[in-house]
Image (spheres, rainbow, N blue to C red):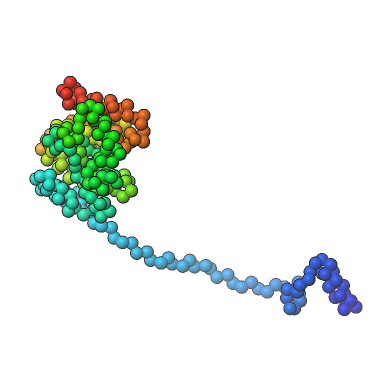
Amino acid sequence: MEREALLAALRLQLEWGADDALEALPVDRFAAPPPAAPVRPVVPARPAAVVVAPLALVPAPAAAAKLAGEADSLDALKDAIAATESTLRDTATNLVFSDGNPASGLMMIGEAPGADEDRAGKPFVGVSGRLLDRMVASIGLQRERDFYLTNILPWRPPGNRTPTDAEIMLFLPFLLRHIALIRPRHLVLLGGVSAKTLLRAKDGITRLRGRWHGLEVEGLGRLPALATLHPAYLLRSPAAKRDAWSDLLLLRRTLDGSVAPE
């Protein structure tokens, strides 16, 4: 009888489609399950130590100010900048110091060199520089004769990124000394970084542009400074050229003596 029952159960399994035996011995489905193995807590592996290369030491602004103050000529100032340790110096190709006529009485200050400037070692020689030359030519100014150009940073930031506050503070004493050596009668601040840094303002360039400001420079007193839009911004936003043209007209009238700086 038991044999017939087992054969009947087997036939039933075959009819249901079971054609393989998965285990060598039958399993007693009614027996109590074996006790579960104790669960061991998972301890996360400690991450491997990451070795971080130390950052290059950056001279304190006081040390940079001392170096800048000791420069008694443009050549000495350029040498002092070249000797100043900076991570920017390590990634750039050329020191970008200045261009134009230092005796013109008009000094224009931008933000930082781009890729073209880094290759040439001169400020504003790329696409935005050519636009700047065309803009000022429309009011009768030529780079070789009528104005002098430099930037806040003498080295190109990697990828043309915006300068950091630490980089600006490092090179600001050199820029102020640069202004003192040139002794300009008027300043033009190209772009928001230049304007906000030198005017110590929190407002953006759209609020600062279009009027003269006063910039205190040691040994020179209060210099008139006109904030305007950077030519690189005008390439991205052509509609803003109208505002830049208005600023140029104000500059022209001031240079001609028909408008006095505030």
Residue sitting at x 31%, y 50%: 158
Residue 43 visible to the viewer: yes
Residue sitting at x 14%, y 33%: 105
Q: Is residue 125 above or below residue 25?
A: above
Residue 215 visible to the viewer: no
- Residue 185 relative to residue 249: left or right: left
Q: Is residue 61 above or below residue 208?
A: below
Could you say which is closer to the camera, residue 175 or residue 249? 249
Residue at the farthest right position: 1
Residue at the farthest top position: 258
Q: Is residue 99 above or below residue 209?
A: below
Instruction: Residue 72: name its quadrant.
Output: top left
Residue sitting at x 15%, y 48%: 78
Count of marks, rendered view: 0
Residue at the farthest left position: 72
Q: From the image, which quarter does the C terminus lie in? A: top left
- Residue 54 relative to residue 18: left or right: left
Residue 258 screen position, x and y as percent: 17, 21
Residue sitting at x 29%, y 34%: 131
Could you say which is closer to the camera, residue 20 or residue 239? 239
Instruction: Residue 204: name its quadrant.
Output: top left
Residue 106 screen position, x and y as percent: 17, 33
- Residue 251 relative to residue 15: left or right: left
Residue 96 screen position, x and y as percent: 22, 46
Q: From the image, which quarter does the N terminus lie in? A: bottom right
Q: Is residue 131 above or below residue 7?
A: above
Could you say which is closer to the camera, residue 119 or residue 185? 119
Residue 63 screen position, x and y as percent: 16, 51
